[in-house]
Image (tube, helix red, strand yellow):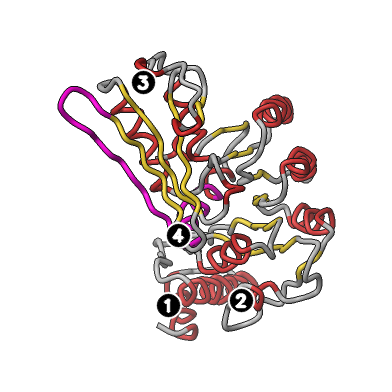
């Protein structure tokens, strides 16, 4: 029904006592009908109602949900470039800034290998980007791929502008995490610190913890193309979680100092062995044995793309936090 037809129907419904009232009622009906028609075009759920002897017109439209503004700090690293592409393609979030000290001025979309530029240049000033997001009063999350020495200041800076943080810096010290936890608790700001962004790695850890209750011997074997990554953050996290259970493993050679037996992680007898071969896929395996059987749990990662589902999950969860959470497993 067009605007003119609605106005005529309004003339039939309303019985004003004077010409001025009649003109006012007709004009009000036209304005209300036009408003509802506009909403109806934008949102199919808009509903028109014309109660008897009333000019009220009711429209129900679902307001759009605000996107999470995401800032990638460490944007030119391999994982930073993959994160730019993943955030850009994810619903409910948008890239708001790309921070790094290299490739400054280049388009974030181009360095991430996207077909179209994002018209967001790489900049070195985190404060400028945070200030822009704070002025828009949007929900924001800073993803930190930087270095252990800068993480604490980066999280504090983000919190000062009202933004939560996701921290994926594998070599971060537990002392830094403890200090960040105290800061976030006092500031009532969210921070999600993740030793790994791989959902498969988190599931491997959970399976290893569950299995460790039933076996007396447990060893970790991992492979990496670069020796600097060993022992990996994943191996340390597995050993740390298992140590909290109070079990003692490998009692037969618990005190062995033979280098071939690998590195002892913690005081519960868990050892890790590293295989380094350039070009090999990164993998982590947990081997457990008991009387008459051996259980092997393993995960291989062939690409940085394996970390992107975990990153998107981490961003969504961090946006709602009001304190520090350690580990992606809390949300699986």
- Tell whether position 292 is magenta: yes
Residue topped by disc 1: 9
In terms of depth relative to the viewer, which is nearer, 322 or 127? 127
**Which residue range is magenta in the image?**
289-315
On the image, the x and y values in percent for residue 208 come to 34, 32
Farthest residue, direction left: 292
Residue at image position (40%, 71%) is 44
Mark 1, secondary structure of its residue: helix
Q: Quadrant of the C terminus?
A: top left
Residue topped by disc 2: 23
Q: In 3D space, how far apart are the residues under numbered discs 2 and 3 (Cα atoms)?
A: 92 Å
Which mark, residue 280? 4
Residue at image position (24%, 35%) is 295
In primary-sequence order, the first of circles 2 and 1 is 1
Residue topped by disc 3: 250
On the image, the x and y values in percent for residue 246 come to 41, 13
Pointer 4 and pointer 1: residues touching (CB < 8 Å)? no
* 82 w.r.t. 176: above or below: below
In primary-sequence order, the first of circles 4 and 2 is 2
- Tell whether position 295 is magenta: yes
Q: In 3D space, how far apart are the residues under numbered discs 2 and 1 (Cα atoms)?
A: 14 Å
Give the crowd class for mark 4: few <14, some 14-19, many >=20 residues within 10 Å: some
Pointer 4 and pointer 2: residues touching (CB < 8 Å)? no
Mark 3, secondary structure of its residue: loop
Q: In 3D space, how far apart are the residues under numbered discs 4 and 3 (Cα atoms)?
A: 29 Å
Residue at image position (66%, 62%) is 77
In primary-sequence order, the first of circles 4 and 1 is 1
Decide if residue 81 is in sight here. Answer: yes
In terms of depth relative to the viewer, which is nearer, 47 or 147? 147
């Amino acid at each position: 029904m067009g605007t003119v037809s609605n106005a005529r129907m309004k003339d039939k419904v309303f019985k004003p006592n004077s010409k001025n009232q009649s003109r006012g009622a007709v004009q009000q009906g036209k304005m209300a009908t036009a408003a509802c028609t506009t909403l109806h075009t934008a949102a199919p759920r808009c509903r028109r109602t014309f109660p008897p002897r009333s000019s009220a017109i009711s429209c129900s439209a679902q307001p759009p949900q605000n996107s999470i503004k995401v800032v990638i700090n460490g944007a030119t690293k391999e994982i930073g470039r993959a994160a730019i592409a993943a955030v850009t393609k994810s619903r409910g979030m948008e890239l708001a800034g790309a921070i790094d000290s290299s490739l400054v001025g280049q388009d974030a979309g181009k360095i991430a290998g996207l077909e179209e530029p994002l018209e967001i240049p790489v900049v070195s000033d985190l404060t400028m980007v945070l200030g822009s997001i704070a002025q828009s009063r949007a929900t924001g999350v800073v993803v930190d791929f930087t270095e252990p020495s800068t993480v604490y200041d980066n999280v504090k800076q983000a919190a000062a502008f009202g933004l939560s943080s996701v921290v994926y810096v594998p070599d971060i010290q537990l002392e830094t995490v403890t200090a960040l936890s105290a800061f976030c608790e006092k500031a009532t700001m969210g921070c999600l610190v993740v030793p790994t962004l791989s959902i498969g790695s988190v599931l491997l850890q959970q399976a290893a913890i569950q299995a460790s209750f039933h076996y007396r011997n447990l060893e970790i074997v991992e492979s990496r193309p670069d020796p600097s990554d060993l022992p990996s953050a994943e191996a340390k996290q597995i050993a740390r979680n298992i140590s909290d259970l109070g079990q003692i493993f490998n009692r037969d050679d618990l005190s062995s100092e033979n280098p071939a037996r690998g590195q002892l992680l913690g005081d519960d007898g868990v050892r890790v062995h590293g295989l380094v071969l350039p070009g090999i896929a990164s993998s982590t395996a947990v081997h457990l044995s008991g009387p008459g059987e051996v259980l092997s749990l393993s995960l291989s990662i062939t690409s940085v793309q394996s970390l992107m589902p975990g990153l998107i999950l981490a961003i969504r969860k961090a946006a709602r936090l009001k304190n520090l959470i350690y580990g992606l497993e809390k949300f699986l």
